[in-house]
Image: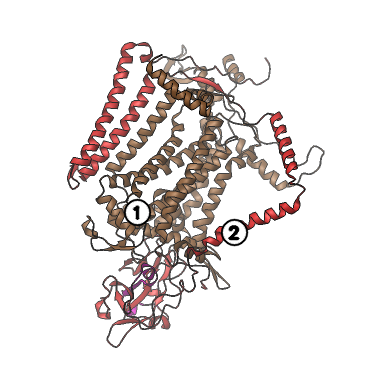
Chain colours: A brown, B red
Amino acid sequence: MTARERVAGTVANYVDERTGAAKWVKKNLTKVFPDHWSFLLGEIALYSFIILLLSGTFLTFWFDPSQREVIYDGGYEPLQGLHMSAAYASTLHISFEIRGGLLMRQIHHWAALIFMAAIVVHLMRVYFTGAFRKPREFNWIIGVGLLTLGIVEGFLGYSLPDDLLSGTGIRIAEAIIQALPVVGSYLAFFAFGGAFPGEAFIPRIFTVHVLLLPGIFLALITVHLMLVWYQKHTQWPGPGRTEKNVVGYPLMPAYMAKAGGFFFIVFGVTAFLGAVASINPVWLYGPYNPGQVSAGSQPDWYMGWLDGLVRMAPPLESYIFGYTISWNILIPGLIVPGILFTGMALYPFIESWITGDKREHHLLDRPRNVPNRTALGVMSLTFMLVALINGGNDIIATTFDLSINQVMWFSRIAIFVLPPIAFVITKRICLSLQRADRELVLHGRETGRLLMLPHGEFVEVHEPISPELAWKLTAHEQAPALALEDVDARGVQRGGRLKNKLRKRISQAHAESIAKPTLNDLKEIEHH
Amino acid sequence: MSNEIEAIKDPGLPAHVHRKADTDPVAEKRAERQVAILFLISALGTLLFIFAYYFVPEDSFVFFPALGNTNAHQLFLGLGLAIALFFIGAAAIHWAKTLMPDEEVIAMRHTMRSDDEDREALVATVKERAGAAGLGRRSLIKRSMGLSLGLIGLSPLVLLRDLGPLPGDDLTKTSWEAGSRLVTDPGDRPIRPEDLEIGAVAQVLPELRGEEKRHLSDIAKDAVLLIRIRPEEFQLSPERLSWTYDGIIAFSKICSHMGCAVALYEQSTKHLLCPCHQSTFDVPRAAKVIFGPAARPLPQLAITVDSEGYLIAQKPFTEPVGPSFWERSS
């Protein structure tokens, strides 16, 4: 036994005698993780969160979350002598006088954008591959919660510097609160400690931004990861992979090194962006003043769709019995996002109701093999994309020499027309890809070699594909549509006929697929 | 031949293919060197970071294509950090990919559902324990507990009451009064009609009295935009026309949609545009909404001149300014 082994043994013994951890650690050091690039997306979100905690802690050492009015006399000459809040002045101080302060600010902001982007792409991966199915519905809901909180946390974060752009964002948030029926103006006065903007809001959202929400994030992320750990990761179908096993690499050492290394890669790339790509140059905007605004005011990208919906809303307000209901704010600002996010959170249950499938699933779906789900996803993304485009309608209009009215009318029509078109096209593409898969399995790969037959006919030589590929292309199950009878076994009419009818229709649409090739098909072809 | 449909068979996990470094000692040595070089690059990155922190002056600039003139201190600090971090990751991953074991292994899953035995035992335990506590029987305790737990939930709501005052008439009143002089913002200078040429725009606020101080929450309600056009271009009701003075018309600058400053005035079309959500208001027609999500025109302020020839307000705003709220009556 070497000296090093003796020391390690002593330490391990000390810990184990007090925790009994040896058994658990032994088992989990060899825990198997399936490998695929798409499984790294959630990791990027996790690592960005850690980067956010580190860079954010650095920023709090100098940031002064106060709306107390000060006169600026710092290093940035164009703003000298101006009245501004201590929050804005300290942001300038971090940017110009603290060495590495600007770098950390930019890393923090870039990490936030990457965090949100990684969450969204990770969510798309989970959705399009059906990874949300039983037993992973809880994790799906936690994920939707993290996405929602991330949007709020990001918004509060870029509101803190109290510059002209962020103040404009807060003004809009205040207007949304104020528009709530019955309680709106009360809630707005409570939130702002009086009339907008007051002097209470920045200190309050600072506490929420650095303590309350990060705490909730930590708790939710911990549960999210523990469930992944406990339920074991999903895997792609392939040779040797079944619903009952998990094929991959043991945690120690390869997976540990890869995941740990990937953290440094993500951090390195974020630091690179912070070094070369200027983001949120608050000193150019000036301090917030409710009587001023800069042209081309834009929120961060993950809020852009919401702003786009608000921009395209029709000018509707109702005045009933002396009270006002602002549909032009409530519909795009609360009702539509509420429906979208609730629908998203409930989707696993909706799909299981459509298919009647209550089994556990650990093998992922290739998106083409579930055309309806894929089409619904692309439809939702199209909706978001149109909204996002309209969120930048002023920038688009000036860049492409259009009028804002043209861009706005395009979005107002496109938000209704394009999503259904996207649904139909995606579904067709999925079915065509299924046909191509079937073709490939039955007739093999086109080699590009042409052969002239003795009687002069030209044919292309097809090469059979490997059994591994053939299995991969046919491993999915094709469940038939739900067979729902309107009368039960004893011939009694079931309740909720309309509901049954609807369920049957959706189930049929959901089950629509090109029959996957079977051994019988292959044999038949050989006979010819 | 049977008619039963037979699925294509799973060929099973393919045989492992060894990497070059697994079999060839030369390749293994090479991979080891590569990993070491990557770690060393990271170390150099940290040195660059430290060097930049202490020795690159904060006001020195370098020119890079694509980046333009860039602050050298910030750039090298960031690049040093980026290199230091990125290459640790690159080294670790290269190490894992070339030298660490790469054989796929199979582990079995277990269903999440507990055994029937355990589930039954749980139900029995819960029933027995709950029965021992008498939860089902003691309805007096149950109900009083429900009451106390329900009530205690109210206490945070009570405690949060002092977050802010009640709105009162704060949302409906501004600082504008009959006779308030219009003063420039910034500058606080009173303004005469002849200071504004046709086509000109000015932002004004009500004049401060005595030692009063102007808060941002005042500006958020009081900001007014003065626009001068040719008087014959107005298409106003006689009442609204009497609120203008010699072609000068005054509107609240706070958007009636979500409260942004309506700051963009297009001289040729006489349109006011809010940069936040593109609500467009037609100035000659009393800021009628002609495009965008705003549902109401900008409130108009009645103005005239005083005996000294300075612009003043005839009377306060006749409706609340800014975004809508529940208690607003129209």
Residue type, numbered disc 1:
Ile
Left or right of A209 on screen, residue A379: right
- Marks 1 and 2 belong to one chain: no
Q: Which residue occupies 34% across, 48% down?
A: A59
The residue stretch that appears in magenta: B214-235
Task: Estimate the x, y position of residue A46 in percent, counting from the top left.
Answer: 44, 38
Q: What chain does badge 1 belong to? A: A
In the image shown, does A483 or A261 lie closer to the viewer?
A261
Left or right of B35 on screen, residue A38: right
Position of residue A184 relative to residue A106, above or below, is below
Q: Which residue occupies 60% across, 35% down?
A: A134
Task: Estimate the x, y position of residue B240 in percent, counting from the top left.
Answer: 41, 80
Given this view, does label 1 or label 2 mark the residue nearer the observer? 2
Left or right of A341 on screen, residue A105: left
Q: CA distance from mark 1 to mark 2?
A: 47 Å
Left or right of B131 on screen, residue A75: left
Q: Identify the secondary structure beneath mark 2.
A: helix
Q: Which residue occupies 30% across, 76% down?
A: B183
Tell me the residue that label 2 is attached to: B154
Q: Identify the secondary structure beneath mark 1.
A: helix
Q: Is residue A384 visible?
A: no
Tell me the residue that label 1 is attached to: A395
Q: Are marks 1 and 2 in contact (CB under 8 Å)?
A: no
In the image shown, does A151 or B261 lie closer to the viewer?
A151
In the image shown, does B212 or B145 lie closer to the viewer?
B145
